[in-house]
Amino acid sequence: MKKGFDLGAFLSEARSEGRVDSEGSFTVAENKALDKLAQFSLPGEYDWVLKIVQAANAWNCEALTISQTRVATSFYFKPEVLPQESHLIQALRSGSSTADGAIHELCLALRALVDQVELSFVLAVHDGTGPAEPIFSGYDVSRLSGNERKTWVNLDREGLRLTVSHFRKKERLTGRYIPTVARVARRHLKILETLQERAFCSPMPILVDGIDTTNLLANESFGADEHYRPLAIGLPEAEEISWLAYPTRSDASLYSRPIETRKQTIWCYLFTVHYLSLPKLHKALSLGIEWSAFAPFRPPKNRFIWTRYGVAVSELVSRSSCVATSLMTFLNGDHLRADLSGLSVYLESQEKRKAERFKELVASELPKLIGEADYLAGARVMPPVQMNFGSDEIAKKGELQAGESALSADISGPFEQFNSFVDFLGSRWREFKATPHRKAYLNKWRQFILMEIRSLEKDLQLFRFQQGEEG
C-alpha cells in the first residue's frame, strides 16, 4: 500500500446498496462497496464528530486530543490495543457491525464524512514499526500530493491520527486561500460547538487546542461565568453520597473536574448563582421580568442525562421550583439498546427504575449540603483542586497542525486575549464595589442556598421517572 487506501475511489468504483440484518448492522458482498448512508444517515451534519468520541471512549483511550485550523481539524487518540490497519480497511470495504465495537463507531464516522457531509479525511494507524500509510477519501485530500497527505497524519508516537478537511469540492480554493471574504462555513467552530453540546460529559478528557471541553466546572454553559459558579459534585459511595463542595469565594477558574467523575458511571453536579450577582437577580425577579428578558440569568433545570460512550444520548428534564440552582445527573447508557446511529437509546422500565433509585438517594443526601452552608459561604478557602488529565504535550508542541497557511490562519487570538483581560478586570471591579457589603451579601447568599437545597429536595421527591412527570 504505497499510496494508501482511497476509500472514496473504492466507493465510487464499486457502489451498491447494502441491506440491514436482524442486528441492525449493514452487510454487502465482499467485492462491492458499502453505500450505507444513501438510506441511513446520522441525524446531524456534525454527528460524525460524536462517533469519533464514542470510538475513543470504547477503546478506553486516555484522552482525545484535537487541534484546529481554518483548514482542517486533526484528532489523536491511542487505544489500549491498537487496531490493525487491515481490520479497519476490511470494515470499510465490507461493512461493520456493533460487534466490532470501537471500529464500528469509527467506520460510521468515516462513512458519514464520505457520503453524508461530503468532506475529506486522512487516517493513519501508527504502531511504531515505521511510517504509516494513510487511509483517505474526499475531493480535497485526494488532490493533495502523497507526501502532503502523510504530513496531515504524521505522528512520532503510537496511536491513531485522523485529519478532516473543512472544505467540500467547490470550496477548496476559496476556503483555503481567501477565507475572510469567501462564504465558506466555519466548520472548525461547528465541530467545537458539537463537542460542547453533546460530548461535555465524556469520562475521557477531550482537549481542543489544550482546553478540556469536558471540564464542566470551567464550562460557561454549566455555571462557570461571572454570574454562576459550581456548588457541589455528588459521588455515590455505597448507600451514601459523597459531596465535593465549592465555597463561593474560592476561585472557580482553578478547578478541574474531579478524577472520580472520570471513573464513575453515575454522578451529579449542582451549580448556582454567584453571591455578587444574587442582588441583581432578586431585583429582576421582583420586577416580574421574564427570564428571557434579563440574560445572563437563565431558568434552573433538573436534568437527567444518559451517556453512551461519552456522548449525551437521552435526557429527561423535570420542572424546578428553585430560583437559580440547577442539578445535572449523569447516568450510564452504554448497555442500553440504541438506534442505528448509536446516538440515541431506548429508556425501558428497568433503566428508569435504576435512575429512580439514584434520584431518591440524592434527595435523601441533600441535607448534608445544608450542613455545609457555613463552609460554602465562608472565607476565601480553596479546597484541594481535583486535577484531571493535564494539558497534553502534543498540543503544546503543535504536532497535530494540518493545512495552516498565512492566509488561512485564524486572527481571532489577540481579540480573545483582550476580551479575557477585560473580563478579568470586570470581575475584580465587581468584587471591589461589593467590598463594603461583602459580609451582608454572603449572609444573604447562605440563606438563599439553604432555601434552594430544600426546594431541590422536594422537587426530586415529587419527580417520577416512570410517568416522566411530577407526582
Image (spheres, rainbow, N blue to C red):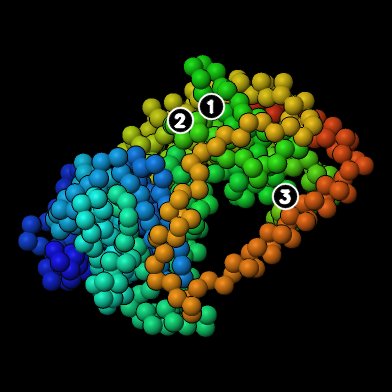
Query: Which secondary structure lies at badge 1?
Result: strand
276 left or right of 214 in image: right
Looking at the image, which residue sits at the far top? 239
Q: Pinpoint residue 305: horizontal percent, then vertical percent.
A: 49, 39
Instruction: Name the residue: 30% across, 72% down.
Output: 148
Q: Pinpoint residue 226: horizontal percent, then vertical percent.
A: 72, 50
Query: Which secondary structure lies at badge 3?
Result: loop
Q: Earlier in the sequence, mark 1 or mark 2?
A: 1
Q: What crowding class fits label 2: few (fewer than 14 Cα within 10 Å), some (14-19), or many (20 or more)?
A: some
Q: Earlier in the sequence, mark 3 or mark 2?
A: 3
269 left or right of 89 in image: right
456 left or right of 344 in image: right
Residue type indicated by callout 3? Glu
Residue 314 in view in this figure:
no
Q: Pinpoint residue 423: horizontal percent, then vertical percent.
A: 73, 57
Disc 2 designates what residue?
Answer: 264
Disc 3 designates what residue?
Answer: 226
Residue 98 location, quadrant = top left
Q: What crowding class fits label 1: few (fewer than 14 Cα within 10 Å), some (14-19), or many (20 or more)?
A: many
Disc 1 designates what residue?
Answer: 235
